[in-house]
Amino acid sequence: MHQGTLFTAPFNLDRLEIASQPVPVVEGVAASSSFGGAQFSFSQEGSFVYVPGANTNPMVSIQWMDRSGRTQPLLPTLGNFFDVRFSPDGQRIAMSDVDQQQDVWVYEWARDTKSRRLTYDPLSDRYPIWTPNDGRRITFSSVRGNRSTFNIYWQRADGTGEPQRLTESKNNQIPMSWHPSGKFLALRENRPQTNWDILILPMDGDEASGWKPRKPTVFLANPSIESEAAFSPNGRWLAYQSDESGRNEVYVRPFPSREGMWQISTGGGELPTWSRKELFYRTTDQRIWAVGYNADGDSFSYESPHLWSDGTFTDRGTRIRNFDLHPDGQRFAVLKAPQTQAENKLDKVTFIFNFFDELRRIAPRTK
């Protein structure tokens, strides 16, 4: 794939190399420049199918969105942004930028300063979250050190010092939420037996004496996919998404006991996000829903979900955060593509029959 065009070339199986220069074969194939994927497949008998379209990960800006659905620029510069997160004081935003290589960046929107790159490793750094209360550090996932598996690191948010590794695992691990005490990190790990599970990483120490990570323990592990855990503001509850019903829904469990479970969403839900009065989540049509709750002491009660805003934003993929709540609880930062890019609907597929005959015609094998 190159800029929406699929290329082909004859391949020499004996020498394990292409036998002539690649030639274009299909134009306008939906593809992701960020992750190198394209929406096509073929059968061994020679039938070819693809999704017509352009880049499925368009450039986006970061916008404010309020309850009315109105948006206004927060970071108007277009970029290949993912994983947007507010700092605890609400004055900074961490995000992944995967335009050239996958790195973590910080933008001080309150001062309207230029975005600052936090990570510089040539391999992938993604999924930033801030440490609670003071936002002194940013926790993120990286494949540095092993080149293929995401483990968890943190680094000072001002860019000083070197990243510190917090976990070592042969499985991919993604940080999700810090407990308000700073003593526990909820993460998700892709384990071969049970798919994505929710684990808790305990942390010993303090800022003065230093921090020491302990071994993560399992909080929730089922054959279904559990992910996107978020601690409540008082730290007594953990919201998360699970596909145990056949589609993603949002649930809440007590922390650390896990005894009891409440299903919060009713028509699908992803990426739960707490304020002090409401629990928000995203639906697959990229709209935000809200649920009022009461979490006094050891009791938890909640109201029926309602649409928080009719405004929409740009889909960046499953389990990828394309919105975040400002600490004031009144507005969101959302990732939104320009209207010209957002109108690129992926709503049909195209079949080409006798595809291999066409390949032999336009890219004949040479002796």
Image: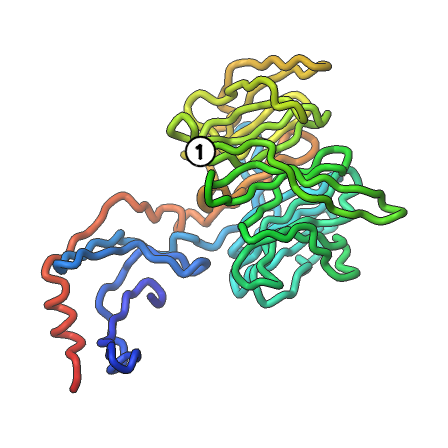
Q: Is residue 255 left or right of residue 37?
A: right
Looking at this view, is 100 or 312 the one in front? 100
The relative height of residue 263 versus residue 119 in the rendered view (above or below) is above
- Residue at the farthest bottom position: 367
Looking at this view, is 173 or 228 the one in front? 173
For the point 73% across and 43% down, the residue is 131
For the point 79% across and 60% down, the residue is 160
Looking at numbered disc 1 in the image, what kind of residue is underneath it?
Ser
For the point 41% across and 23% down, the residue is 267
Estimate the x, y position of residue 306 in percent, counting from the top left. Answer: 50, 19
Q: Is residue 170 left or right of residue 139?
A: left
The relative height of residue 323 versus residue 280 in the rendered view (above or below) is below
For the point 27% across and 43% down, the residue is 347
- Residue at the farthest right position: 208
State the count of labels.
1
Estimate the x, y position of residue 236 in percent, counting from the top left. Answer: 69, 24
Q: Is residue 31 left or right of residue 84?
A: left
- Assign the N terminus to one quadrant of the image: bottom left
Estimate the x, y position of residue 202 in percent, counting from the top left. Answer: 72, 39
Looking at this view, is 135 or 154 the one in front? 154
- Residue at the farthest front position: 193
Estimate the x, y position of residue 312 in percent, counting from the top left. Answer: 46, 36
Q: Is residue 14 left or right of residue 116?
A: left
Picture quarter containing residue 31? bottom left
Label 1: how many residues lie within 10 Å, few (<14), some (14-19) or many (20+)?
some
Name the residue tied to disc 1.
224
* Scheme by which the image is coloured: rainbow
The relative height of residue 67 versus residue 55 in the rendered view (above or below) is above
Q: Which type of secondary structure does the marked residue at label 1 adopt? A: loop
